[in-house]
Image: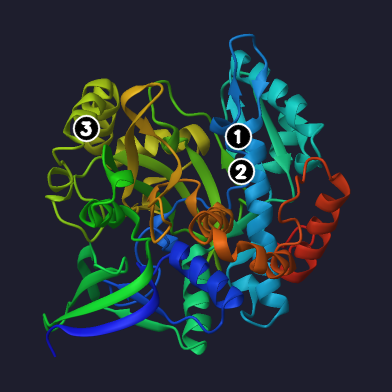
Amino acid sequence: MSNRQTKTDVILIGAGIMSATLGTLLKELVPDWNITVFEKLATAGEESSNEWNNAGTGHAALCELNYTVEKQDGSIDISKAIKINEEYQVSKQFWSYLVKSNLIRNPQDFIMPLPHLSLVQGEENVTFLKKRFEALSDNPLFQGMEFSDDPGKLMEWIPLIMQGRTTNEPMAATRIESGTDVNFGALTRMLFDHLKSKNVDIKFKHSVDDIKRASDGSWELKVRNVDNGTVERHTAKFVFIGGGGGSLPLLQKSGIPEGKHIGGFPVSGLFMVCKNPDVVAQHHAKVYGKAKVGAPPMSVPHLDTRFIDNKKSLLFGPFAGFSPKFLKTGSMFDLIGSVKPNNVFTMLAAGAKNVPLTKYLIQQVMLSKEQRMEELREFIPNAKSEDWDIVVAGQRVQVIKDTAAGKGTLQFGTEVISAADGSIAALLGASPGASTAVSVMLELVKRCFPQQLKAWEPKIKEMIPSYGVSLLKNPELIEEIHTSTGRTLGLTNELQPA
């Protein structure tokens, strides 16, 4: 069967949340297009999208302090928090559309209501949190946020964290009830089940080894069957590379100029999971603290209630780490292999700039379980070692590129790189990735299919009522979206029983 040639309209590489979202959008917009998906592993959502590879998900910038930065003049810049929250509202509208149209069922299998809290200690941090609260609470997207520095109130909100505290250091928290917990592994699998029912050809255990341009402008992929080693050729007019950490090497193979001068910096992580149901039952929230000085933004410590397999879990992390692999199932040579003549100086500049970060990551790798428990005890003073296990998180590959800030700048975020003609696009980067997947993929649709966009707009607006509208300028639309998505997705404001 070697070298069999197959033509299709769209190829999606990687069966994670991004390909699942793009495939679902395209199937709604143009049902008659043929879509083929290639995934190296045996099932969907096994790498970055997997529920056990993320300590906390459902990012709407309600509690993540790294999205609201204090400026030189002491004011708080909330623009990034607003952008992420607006993008999360887009995701919720799309998921609601899928549930209402019966394309996916049982939203409680992937999304649950859960309060989001930010928690800080020390005079300076309490002042920062109060300023952040004042900046956000006037904003219609962050309606319902409460602030308290009263230990009695904090005991009500987060008993597990407040019990057994001996310090007199001032503490404060903000809390917003309309937060959620999202299981992106479950959602990814649901979306692929739906795509399968729409005749999308999903080929598991198929690895894309090469991508090159054919003379007619289409893309030719060399695809290897992982089990028996046979190779097939597949061509498509449009290719999306959504392979998480595996995207960069494939983007480099495509040879598009937009993919040059870009590198990847792999960051691994660990988190702790509680195996004592009595402890799990005492906490019902996502609680985010402040990153330690010198720590990268993705290592903000947080204690998260998560719903996995319809069961309540408690996760703490992340502890950052370093591994040269680009995927959890990747190779030790991934990092070295990604260094090319066109990005070597970018990579070297990033290496020189990020010596403190690399040192920090290596120190994190060296921590013993007991040292990790000490960090956990900053959150849960009474935490016992025997109640907690260590889990290895997914690999994240941060984008390195030359920007106005200089050569080899490390980017924390998600980025779409596409060819000038829109025929191929790749998704690079990490957080807040999954939570903003729908916005990111709509942006890709806009960029890669400009000719079709006008015809598609009515359908996009049907799926996402706020499409093309600034939510901030339309507070009544925010209210409407909150109510309708809340009802469809089962996110009513009554607190769920613990």
> Which residue is depicted at the point 29% across and 75% down?
235
What is the x, y in percent for residue 354? 28, 24
Q: Are marks 2 and 1 in contact (CB under 8 Å)?
A: yes
N-term mark: 3 or 2: 2
Q: Which residue is mark 1?
A: 80
What is the x, y in percent for residue 118? 62, 35
Callout 2: 10 Å neighbours few (<14), some, many (20+)? many
Left or right, 495 with reference to 476: left
Q: Secondary structure at mark 1?
A: helix
Q: CA distance from mark 1 to mark 3?
A: 27 Å
* Mark seen at residue 84: 2
Q: Choose mark 1 or mark 3, whichever is in front.
A: 3
Vertical order, 135 against 322 (above or below): above
Q: Secondary structure at mark 2?
A: helix
Furthest toward the right, the residue is 476
What is the x, y in percent for residue 98? 65, 74
Q: Is residue 212 visible?
A: yes
Depth check, front residue: 238 or 23: 238
Q: CA distance from mark 3 to mark 2?
A: 28 Å
* Mark seen at residue 91: none
Furthest toward the front, the residue is 216
Depth check, front residue: 63 or 232: 232
Callout 3: 10 Å neighbours few (<14), some, many (20+)? many
Left or right, 422 with reference to 108: left
Left or right, 449 with reference to 498: left
Q: CA distance from mark 2 to mark 1?
A: 6 Å
